Image (cartoon, grey):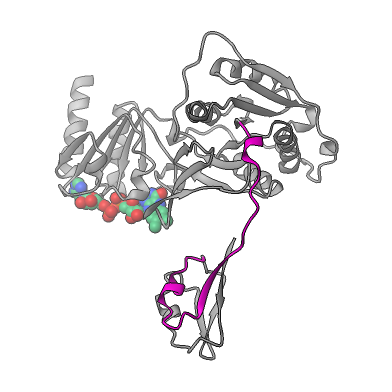
Amino acid sequence: MAKIAILERKCTGCGLCASNCPFGAIDMKDGRPDLNAACKVCGICVKNCPEKAILKLETKVDSVDKSKWNDILVFAEVSGGRLHPVCLELVGKARELAKNVNYKVKTVLVGSGVSAFAEELKHYGVSEIAVYDDPALSYFRADAYAACVEDYIKYAHPSVVLVGATSLGRSLAPRLSTRFHTGLTADCTKLELRENTDLVQIRPAFGGNIMAQIITTNTRPQFATVRYKVMTPPERAEEASGDILIRKIPKGVLESRVSCVSVEPIPPKKSISDAEILVVGGRGLQKESDLDMIRELARLLGGDWATTRPLVEKGWNTNDRQIGLSGRTVRPRLIITCGVSGAIQFTACMNGSDHIVAINTDKNAPIFDVAHVAIVGDLYEIVPALIRQLKEAQA
Ligand SMILES: Cc1cc2nc3c(=O)[nH]c(=O)nc-3n(C[C@H](O)[C@H](O)[C@H](O)COP(=O)(O)OP(=O)(O)OC[C@H]3O[C@@H](n4cnc5c(N)ncnc54)[C@H](O)[C@@H]3O)c2cc1C
């Protein structure tokens, strides 16, 4: 842990620290700097102080014995009666990481009637599948689920715990990391494992302008959440392997402070993350009704449509059809972007697509850096021409 300290006897109140702070975290009060909650302890004020009146204090933290924490654990989420596909994507990534350091990959299932999924997981190369199966766990109660996973972590001592960044996972992972007084990085887009078993958790930061590499150096386990469609799932093996470990439900779980009054299932909705073909409209579209041609092209290709964030902000579309850091991650076989510039906040969540076709009038648009096929031209000519050709071909 680090913190900033200001030496009053040295400070002349010049205000350079406040004017240079990129986070606006220093207020000048009665001619003296005063740190507010926006401080990120970046240390820029330390460098800028001509009087050396600002110090960055590092607190030495005792490191755990890392050799006692081994293997990678994947939380296998079951929701709506199915194994969430993000779980297999995480197993695929975990297997890749595990090879570097000779780790095993384990999974934990929590819920009611989840034992059936343990059999299925045996086809994905995991060495152990821990199961907490009880009718009391039939719906997600954060405290009860956290207690079960905590119980298994205390038993298995995994070095890394991967959780899908779903609504359930986003509620569960921080509760667990807090219980173990350790770090959690949300929404990782890339993961690497160093030889010393430190997990390099890579994710966009500062509005997507940098890719931050976050490391949990002193504590274990290392928690990371990853969104659906970011990693690649492994092939299902014909042969089953791995052991199923039925765990006793920890004491007190049934006395959860959360009780379920009623469950109102929301009818399953098609998500753009599941689409195989996507046509995307960006700010190159001049009016809302021009989205009709985007939808028409998508329909003719047997795919779905989506937009960039500015169109959601204009009220032309809803957030569930927005691609990007503050929307969804997609990985279709084919994506056609129309009038999209290719900001990092957008491309970071679609650049894993198999085939990217971009239409833009600006030959220098950054979208062309990730596109496999670049069409420099006016979408108002190209999209109708594509629609016409597809209609002719289908006729
Ligand atoms: C924290 C944060 C999170 C964000 N999250 C997201 C997110 O989740 N998703 C997202 O999309 N954005 C997000 N953004 C915004 C992002 O930075 C960009 O502003 C946005 O992606 C730009 O959208 P655009 O490409 O549609 O528009 P623009 O950048 O305005 O690009 C429009 C493009 O259309 C082209 N064009 C214009 N007319 C035509 C034509 N007739 N034919 C062909 N091309 C044409 C132009 O050359 C231009 O390149 C986020 C930003 C921040 C700071």
Any part of residue 283 in sight: no
Is residue 142 or residue 209 the one in the foreground? 209
Task: Identify the residue at image location x=85%, y=40%.
Answer: 255
Span colored in magenta: 41-70
Q: In the visual, does 305 lie left or right of 103?
A: left
Left/right placement of residue 289 relative to residue 78 reads left
Please tell me how many numbered marks the rendered image carries: 0
- In terms of depth relative to the viewer, which is nearer, 162 or 12? 12
Does residue 90 sit above or below 50 in this rendering?
above
* Residue located at (46% from left, 73% from top): 46
> Which quadrant would residue 355 be assigned to in this image?
top left
Considering depth in this image, is 118 or 29 the residue closer to the camera? 29
**Position of 66 relative to 8 (above/below):** above
Instruction: Tell me, yes or no, if residue 138 can be seen here.
Output: yes
152 versus 45 height, above or below: above
Question: Is residue 67 toward the left or the right of residue 211 in the image?
Answer: right
List x then y, in percent, for residue 43. Answer: 47, 68
Task: Look at the image and tell me in which quarter the C terminus lies.
Answer: top left
Task: Identify which residue is drawn at 74% across, 32% down.
Answer: 155
Question: Is-magenta flag for residue 323?
Answer: no
Residue 1 in the image: x percent, y percent? 59, 60
**Where residue 112 appears, x then y in whole percent?**
73, 26
Residue at image location 49% in from the left, 26% down from the top: 99
User: In x, y percent, where is residue 214?
Assistant: 49, 49
Task: Determine if the magenta segment contains residue 52.
Answer: yes
Q: Nearer the viewer, residue 111 or 128?
A: 128
Q: Which residue lies furthest to the top in this view?
A: 239
